[in-house]
Image (tube, grey):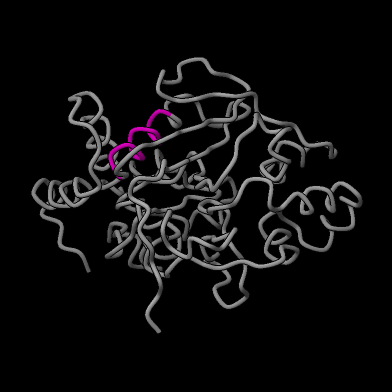
Amino acid sequence: MQQQISSHDNVVKQIICMKWGDLYGAEYANRLYAAVRLNTTGPLRFVCLTDDVTGLRSEIETYPCPVIDIPEPWCNAGWRKLTLYLDSGSLYELTGDWLFLDLDVVVTGSLDPFFSYESEHPFVVMKNWTQPDKKIGNTSVFRFRMGEHQYLLERLLQDFEEFRDRYKNSQTYVSREINSLKFWPDSWCALFKVQCVPRWPRRIWAAPKLPPETKVVAFPGFPNPSDAMLGNWPEKKWHKKIYKRIQPAQWIDVYWAKAEENLESGTGNGAADSAMARRLFQERKGYVPE
């Protein structure tokens, strides 16, 4: 069945991210902004909810990152994302549809379709590719309607321990408790460890590849993009170090560099430039997509 994609080219595209603690510095938010600006057309609003605005680009709109009233350490884990489901009045009067992106995603294609795909639906999310048949979303990349899902936060706060024990993590909780959800087309979002890293033992000598048509690559857990770019997969347990090995994913640096170059040159936005980044990588490294 053909998927329905409507056009909203003149609508302000709203993107939101969250940054708290010291796991990711300002450079990650700045890189994300640069990548978003390169890969969206038309008016853009980019918001970062954060506990530290130091070093953030002036184009990024910032507000204090809401806290969630649950015990440590969960209050500073992925569960904190559920504060996005506060009512608009409690979340700085933000309204409308927002595309949430984790700080550590790498944008490799146009983001425009994420705003028009299933535009009437209040929640669309990336599929969790570690469990592709269980209809669980990966909340590294999702679009939601502000104020539409307050019940998710309210329900969680009423009995956090019960839900934590039942679901283990926040994205499973959201996927099971939300009234309705849809998934992005499979080719749009890739999980680095699943779709990019070659199977064992090829990963020892073969570099991670970017699947065709991928628009966003997610990096939950380890390695993060900075490590993956260098071919590092941090792991403390010696027996896991045997198979948690990768070659450098050099294309990450190319996409980051192109986005920064776009901002510095003042050439503005243009999603078509993402294709240029692919060609640039091929020219530099002799890369041929599989």
Name the residue nearer the viewer: 213 or 130.
213
Q: Position of residue 189 (x, y in %)?
A: 42, 60
Identify the residue at image location x=51%, y=48%: 222
Name the residue nearer the viewer: 133 or 41.
41
Identify the residue at image location x=41%, y=41%: 12
Left/right of residue 53 with respect to residue 46 in the rendered view: right
Identify the residue at image location x=47%, y=61%: 243
Left/right of residue 137 with respect to residue 208 in the rendered view: right
Identify the residue at image location x=61%, y=66%: 181
Q: Quadrant of the C terminus?
A: bottom left
Left/right of residue 128 with respect to residue 268 in the rendered view: right
Residue 229: quadrant of the picture: top left
Q: Position of residue 203 (x, y in %)?
A: 35, 62
Q: Position of residue 75 (x, y in %)?
A: 76, 38
Left/right of residue 138 with respect to residue 228 in the rendered view: right
Q: Residue 37 in magenta?
A: yes
Name the residue nearer the viewer: 153 or 212.
153
In magenta, the rendered stretch is 30-39
